[in-house]
Amino acid sequence: MAKTIWKFQLSITNTQNVLMPEGAQILTAQIQNGCDLCLWALVDSTAPKQRREIEIIGTGNFVTDESRRYISTVQGKGLENQSLVWHVFERE
């Protein structure tokens, strides 16, 4: 069975659900084109879709004790062109 790498655009928000094929292996999250936060995953495009909960936590923000898997740290520009750092996780 061949797999494909898919890109999913994320919103810079605390939590969001991303619909992706079941069993998808999340590879990384990065800023693309200077402003778009994206996540890439290795997927079986024929698998049924499932929701995966992605959490984005800014440096210095409160982190709960909930179980989560680290994906990546990304840097970008916020309002007024200030430099920001976000940490992307998947809630388990």
Image (cartoon, rainbow, N blue to C red):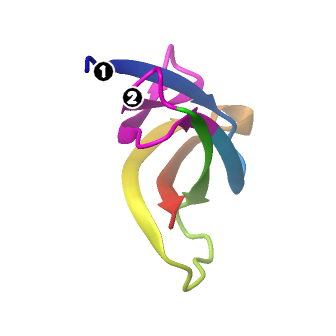
Q: Secondary structure at mark 2?
A: strand
Quadrant for residue 42, please give it.
top left
Question: Please, which residue is most extreme toward the left here?
Answer: 1
Q: Nearer the viewer, residue 19 or 37?
A: 19
In x, y percent, where is residue 14? 70, 57
> Residue type at mark 2?
Val
Q: Report the magenta stretch's main SS.
A: strand
> Residue type at mark 1?
Lys
In x, y percent, where is residue 91? 54, 64
Q: Nearer the viewer, residue 22 or 15?
A: 22
Q: Which residue is mark 1?
A: 3
Q: Which residue is mark 2?
A: 43
Magenta stretch bounds: 19-47
Q: Secondary structure at mark 1?
A: loop
Could you tell which of marks 1 and 2 lies nearer the N-terminus? Answer: 1
| Contact between labelled residues 2 and 1, with CB atoms less than 8 Å apart | yes
In x, y percent, where is residue 7? 48, 22
Residue sitting at x 38%, y 41%: 26
Quadrant for residue 28, please give it.
top left
Question: Please, which residue is most extreme toward the top here?
Answer: 33
Residue sitting at x 25%, y 21%: 1
Question: Please, which residue is most extreme toward the bottom here?
Answer: 65
CA gap between label 1 and label 2 equals: 5 Å
In x, y percent, where is residue 57? 58, 60
